[in-house]
Image (spheres, rainbow, N blue to C red):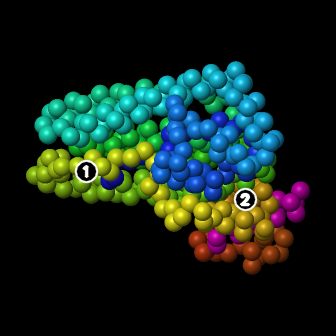
Amino acid sequence: MPLSVLYLIVPSYLAGVALSAVNLHQTLKLREDLKQLRLEVKDGFIDMKQVLKDQGAEILKQIDQVAQDIEFQHHRTILAQAYGHFIEAVNWLRNTLMLTQTTDRNAALVGVEGMLRKAIADYNNPQIYKDICSAGRLRRLECAWAIDQTITLTYELRGAYQVVSDRLSHLQDKIRQDSLTLIDLCQTDDELDFLFPEIARICEHDLAVLNSWQNDVNWKRSLPPSEIKLLQSADFDTSEISVGSDAANPTADSIPPEVLLYEKLKQKSHSASLRDQLKFMLKSDLRQGHESYISQQATASGYKALAPSNWQEIPDFTVANLYWYFKHKTA
């Protein structure tokens, strides 16, 4: 498993700014610019006035207003401290992997874990989620997920594969539940325009990476002790440690497929249906209640053809749209 984190630890502080300015396409461009050192990260933040300088005076004005907000300044202090702990832990981890003695390495990894736990405690602080928009909430959650993943990495490097598997399973569940909560908190079409592509990408890329990692760890658990010992004593390529995204990103300038998908679905779906489709991506079991309701209403209305016997062949798009069709019809 590459020694990296899923997300950039750069919290969004654009509460109140047009969400279209910080959409998925823009975010991927920012990540590429940071990777290529075209942008500077200072205390875990980037200068959004520099990034959005071509977006218009109104957005720049709102950025200035946010920067002067007392609540934001309080959040920034907490997040800057957390980012500092995270970067210190990553640097410590790089040095740790240069150690040749297993005992020394494991002892150092305990220290790295402790530093990471300080960082994640700040990112899980309820105060930093108070009165922020969906963009800010998601970015901060992503940071917490990334740190959680890095803590799990320290356990893998110590050969604690059962712990790693359990933590990865829990993290995937947490990401899904946090994302479902975000969807429930979504109140406007602008927020949905922002969240849908972002969460769709999390489903298609980030959760897939975590699942692949867990499968790899479970395979290691099945190995005999002699082979596990060989794995634990193997050299690691420290050059693979990075703070960034490993998700597929063909080009920073190309429109992400999740955005194209959303634009296509948006032409044919009500906003409530789009929310449900996004929830189905995260947790397919949520379809069952919709399927049951559609079957009942279709039978009662004489549209038996709309109540299929095999729901597995019916896409989320159709299930959500049929559900809301009958909801509006019976209202």
Q: Position of residue 308 (x, y in %)?
A: 68, 75
Is residue 288 at all visible to an observer of this figure? Answer: no
Instruction: Please tell me the numbered disc located at residue 279.
Output: none
Q: Nearer the viewer, residue 241 or 221?
A: 241
Q: Is 224 on the left-hand or right-hand side of 240?
A: left
- Residue visible at 79% across and 46% down? 56
Sequence-first tag of 1 and 2: 1
Q: Position of residue 159 (x, y in %)?
A: 23, 43
Which residue position holds label 2?
Answer: 274
Q: Which residues are magenta?
A: 314-331
Please identify, in this view, whether the residue under mark 1 or under mark 2 is nearer the observer. 1
Residue type, numbered disc 1: Asp
Which residue position holds label 1?
Answer: 237
Q: Main secondary structure of the magenta part?
A: helix
Is residue 17 at all visible to an observer of this figure? Answer: yes
Residue furthest bottom in the image = 305
* SS label for mark 1: loop
* SS label for mark 2: helix
Query: As displayed, is residue 137 above or below residue 200?
Result: above
Check disc 1: other Cα within 10 Å, few if <14, some if 14-19, many if 20+. Answer: few
Quadrant housing the C terminus = bottom right
